[in-house]
Amino acid sequence: MTRLTPRQRLVLQWVKRYARRRGRWPTMRETMEAFGMQSTNGAASTFRALEKKGFMKRGRGRYDSWELTGYRFILVEI
């Protein structure tokens, strides 16, 4: 199993919670703001590292679209 840095682990957990609560994946800007990063480059480099380690992959459509690999969530209407 590939080891994650503490920051990567936090981002990965946050992305999962975000997806469950909002029914979509967060954007890089939302990730940047949630972690107090100075630019979207910080979020992008974290996402690229998670992609390299097999935890995320680029989504279809927008250039900044990402998905977690092997993770599905169900959108429930209340």
Image: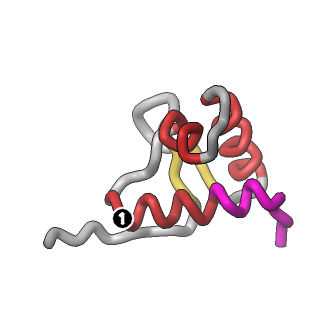
Q: Is residue 52 left or right of residue 25?
A: right
Quarter assignment of residue 73:
bottom left
Quick check: is 18 in the magenta stretch? no
Residue at the location (62% across, 46% down)? 35
The x, y position of residue 40, in whole percent, is 61, 29
Q: Is residue 34 left or right of residue 47?
A: left
Residue identified by numbered label 1: 21
Outermost residue toward the front?
36
Q: Amino acid at mark 1?
A: Arg
Residue at the location (84% across, 66% down)? 2
The x, y position of residue 15, in whole percent, is 53, 57
Query: Where 66 falls versus 70 (above or below)?
Result: above
Secondary structure under the numbered disc 1 in the rendered image = helix
Residue at the location (48% across, 66% down)? 17
Quarter of the N terminus within the rendering? bottom right
Quarter assignment of residue 33:
top right
Q: In the image, which residues are magenta?
A: 1-11
The x, y position of residue 28, in whole percent, is 54, 37
Residue at the location (16% across, 69% down)? 77
